[in-house]
Amino acid sequence: MSQKKGIGKTALITGASSGIGQELAKLFAQDGYNLVLVARSVETLHRLSEVFEMNYGTEEVLVIEKDLSEEDAARDVYEQVKAKGITVDVLVNDAGVSTYGKFATETDWETEKSLIHLNVLTTTLLTKLYLKDMVARNEGKILNLASLVSITPFPLQAVYAATKSYVWNLTQSLVNELKDTNVTVTALMPNATDTDFFNKAGASDTLVTEMLDDPAMVAKDGYDALMAGKPKVVPGGIKNKAFEVMAYTMPQEMLASQMRKFNTPKQQVKEEAKSSGLAIGIGLAAVALTGIALAALYRNASWSDKLQAQYQYGKAKYKAGKAYDQVKHAVSEVLA
Ligand SMILES: NC(=O)c1ccc[n+]([C@@H]2O[C@H](COP(=O)([O-])OP(=O)(O)OC[C@H]3O[C@@H](n4cnc5c(N)ncnc54)[C@H](OP(=O)(O)O)[C@@H]3O)[C@@H](O)[C@H]2O)c1
């Protein structure tokens, strides 16, 4: 039987009452860790602690009811844990929220201020306080909830995406600063995940909510990367890794426009697709064909080269025709 690696250790998880944080808390409990669970929904945290004690034999669970968007919340949590004589071996900065709408005219500053406090200031101060102790002991691990929108613009959730860029950037700098120690920091970068997150943000009817990942999968990939001391992890296999590569390579303007589409209400996307989707598909195919035809016409080439160019044109025409059919099919699916 494999030894549970968390026996005698403690993990502190913010945002443990729901979604990815709750799934992470479960993984720590299964691995034998004692827990410090922090969130506002104190009853949920107590219920969870009972379930963990019953199902996994968790020995110690400290529940801290805290609104982490408040001034000094991070320091207060740190002091409460210290007063109990608990050493935190693993810190998970999971608690985070978003808000939806156009920054200039629709979103509310007080909501954004509180969001920045939670996602940025509390995450930074908790990291600072615990990192200092971890470096002094030369051991410890931190998992910070970043996002795939850490590396893309996300119109209509602009402030949220900016806070996640901050978390990602901070984490990667710390990875470097800590490289000569046994302390590791990991950024977890999920794609859109099936939690209460979009609902709470007021974005539950957006196109992106049709393609959500499983929070248990996200947590497991994050947990494994944290334990392996990796600097970052994009959970969800090739689909999300391809998205990551696209985010690094695509021009920002195009990326922003694609992300805006994902973050637009489904009904609006369908209506827009009706008027422009087919035209875009036809346009793309036409551009491809025109480019290749011009290359064939103007190529200053020998007879055999021209034959070769004509062959390429025929092949491209066939491929463009297929691409056009695929676009037509995709658009008709969206419109169905
Ligand atoms: N879902 C996604 O698509 C997605 C994608 C990428 C990254 N993420 C990140 O993953 C993290 C977890 O989100 P989730 O998807 O699991 O959402 P969720 O189910 O809504 O969970 C959010 C957690 O944060 C806690 N929280 C929110 N505001 C708080 C506050 N003021 N004080 C203390 N705790 C607070 C909530 O607890 P209480 O309400 O009980 O306080 C809850 O436990 C966030 O940092 C989010 O940015 C999510």
Image (cartoon, grey):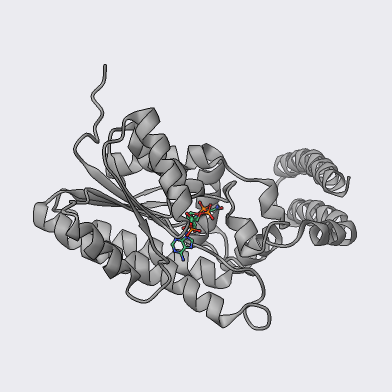
Residue 20 position (above or below residue 167):
above
Q: Residue 128: image x %, image y %?
A: 24, 66
* Residue located at (76% from left, 52% from top): 288
Viewer can see residue 145: yes
Name the residue nearer the viewer: 197 or 278: 197
Q: Quarter of the image for the N terminus: give it.
A: top left
* Residue located at (37% from left, 72% from top): 121
Q: How many marks?
A: 0
Q: Quarter of the image for the C terminus: give it.
A: top right
Residue 326 position (above or below residue 277):
above
Q: Residue 255: image x %, image y %?
A: 61, 62
Q: Residue 33: image x %, image y %?
A: 27, 38
* Residue located at (19% from left, 51% from top): 86
Q: Residue 172: image x %, image y %?
A: 32, 59
- Toward which corner of the image does residue 130 lie, by quadrant? bottom left
Residue 151 position (above or below residue 43):
below
- Toward which corner of the image does residue 294 lie, by quadrant? bottom right
In the picture as drawn, the residue positioned furthest to the top comes out as 1
Name the residue nearer the viewer: 328 or 215: 215
Q: In the image, 220: left or right of 316?
A: left
Q: In the image, 317: left or right of 81?
A: right
Name the residue nearer the viewer: 262 or 36: 36
